[in-house]
Image (cartoon, rainbow, N blue to C red):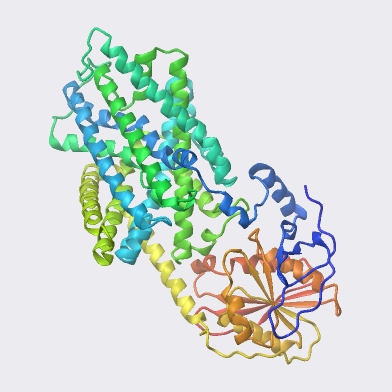
Amino acid sequence: MPEPPQEPRSGPTPRPGPITRYRVDLPRAGILPTGERGHFEATEYAQTRTGLRGSLLNYKDRIIGSSMSSRRLSEERLSKKVALAIFSSDALSSTAYATQEILLILVLAGTGALGYSLPVAIAITLLLGIVVVSYRQTIRAYPGGGGAYIVAHENLGVVPGLLAASALLIDYVLTVAVSIAASVEAIYSAVPGAHDYAVPIALGLVALIMLGNLRGIRESGTIFAIPTYGFVAVLSATIAVGIVKVLTGDSPNIFSVGEPTGEVHAEKALTLFLVLRAFSAGCTALTGVEAISNGVSAFKPPEARNAATTMTAMALILGSLFLGTTLLARHFGIVYQHGDNETVMSQIGAEVFGRNAVYYTLQAFTAGILFLAANTSYNGFPLLGAILARDGYLPRIFHQRGNRLVFSYGILALTAFAALLLVAFNASTTRLIPLYALGVFLSFTLAQSGMVRRWLTLKEPGWQRAAVINAVGGVATGLVFVIILVTKFREGGWMVVVTLPVIAIAAWLIGRFYRGLDRSLRVPPEAQLDLKPQGISGIPVIVPVEAINLATVMAIGAACERSREVVAVHVLVDPDERSTVEERWQKQFPSVPLVVIDSPFRTVAEPIAVYVNDRLHQPPHEVTVMVPTVEVRRWYQRPLVNQSVKRLIKLLGTRRHVTVVEAPFSGGGRPRGSRVRRQS
């Protein structure tokens, strides 16, 4: 563990006029010179590690790793091989249960209906090709990442964009729940005694994959590559050996329908509606296909070309495995009905290899990729949450990166929702599947419709061909969405239909709140705000500044009335972006010095606390901190504001000779009188 920071000795006190940077003499103090003149940054030593919280942080570091600087973010890029494992694990793993879901529906009409499994699988594979070709156009148009939300929001408007985002958020949660439940089923297919512990095992797997993702994308990518490629290799070998076994056996016609392996009692007539139900159930094979287009920015340069190549490779592998699995299941007469504890994949493995070491290897890799398929959601859900938070449709904490450069709040939220579903549905794939795929096909349709609108509006080179491709994709996925909605509505799809608009409306209300707040706090860049310290107190007043807004103006005004020495402190958490605070400060606050601290470890409160502690070593050895805050009218709006402020007030409350004064500003646009929050 690193040694605790030594006591710093401050550099010259900031003076009115040009922007200055805080400097200390000792390198272990938590704020260091960067080599650029007058520019300093907070180090990991600026993070407080004392008391119970410090002990918990140390234990956390042992589990998920120590903090990483934002400058390492560019290092966390993926090669095509690793990206295929991470972004395609969800889609590829669906071969473990997509055929099973088709058979589960067809068997209701008796053994004669099982022969339709291959035509249904072929139709789904053709749909896969249409979707992939369409999404390659999206990658081309949005090389920085073009998920359904971004495409629909930019080209169709706010409401379609939020509907697409809500659909994807729901589907990401269901992907984790379904993948983990299917993984547990693969385990107890080989080890029947594990069936009674399905829910505890599922929750343990969710916790394990959460910890893997909290460590960061590069390490998780290395872990996930082995099971993904292992599954592809073993299942490919199973299909190849199975086909050879059939061709060299007594019945060499691979396309024949075998005698059913179990007793079947027809419950329904074979109708078009039943076949469409089987088709909609098998469309779970396409879930996760869009993940690559969502994560283009995670690829190594050239990002768009590498992402498009990876998507094509994924489609070829997925289509081959899905058709091969369905072909063997059809020929061997595999039957799967409600209540069966052995999966279709397990039955195919037993038919091809017998229950030997190769069979158990297939089951192990099947369980492994189903477990890791959830990782697609652990990349997609937090990233989408961060984009929504950036645009003001989710609480802004979802846009903050954690210690390991991942969106920790998104990871934790996804884990909580998936765990809730696993408990509520008893970790049963059969019960979860009816909720699945509805959201993703809605997002497919909105994304492709948005792309058509984009091509028709911009008319870039080759737009006619691109518009036709996306139009075909949009029509195809739209029809599938209607089919899934009709066939799965009574089985559980209604829950998605109810939940989806609720999430979209909540996001819209959050966006309206943030837009109203920004309007009430806005300070025009051309406004002259020449506030001068003119108080009678000799105790310096430090004002933390997040942005130049009315809350900041009121806090600085109160500080200038209180003391003859006022210093503003601004923490910059993104090293690649120049702060607008710096750009506007000299013009709008020429008489108040501004201290800028780079914080590559993304902490805000801790560097300010270090600066305050350093100022205590100068006469008069006492400091007042004037903290701008925003007051809101309703209790449910409180999580949307003042998150960094709360942490700062808590930190400074433990300092002796520090007076913390809140300068509250009403969300309705009215300043309130300042109040002493804590004095030590």
Left or right: residue 114 versus residue 211 is left
Residue occupying image coordinates x 33% and y 54%: 138
User: In front: 435, or 584?
Assistant: 584
Left or right: residue 525 versus residue 678 is left
Residue at the far top: name it. 250
Relative to 506, is 320 above or below?
above
Residue 665 pos. (x, y %): 57, 80
Left or right: residue 114 versus residue 511 is left
Relative to 192, is 153 above or below?
below
Number of marks in picture: 0
Left or right: residue 115 versus residue 634 is left
Image quadrant containing the C terminus = bottom right
Residue 657 pos. (x, y %): 82, 73
User: In front: 334, or 548?
Assistant: 548
Residue 1 pos. (x, y %): 77, 47
Asked where in the image residue 564 lies, by quadrant, the reply is bottom right
Asked where in the image residue 421 lies, by quadrant, the reply is top left
Residue at the far front: name it. 461
Relative to 525, is 112 above or below?
above
Does the image show residue 443?
Answer: yes
Residue 586 pos. (x, y %): 63, 84
Does the image show residue 493?
Answer: no
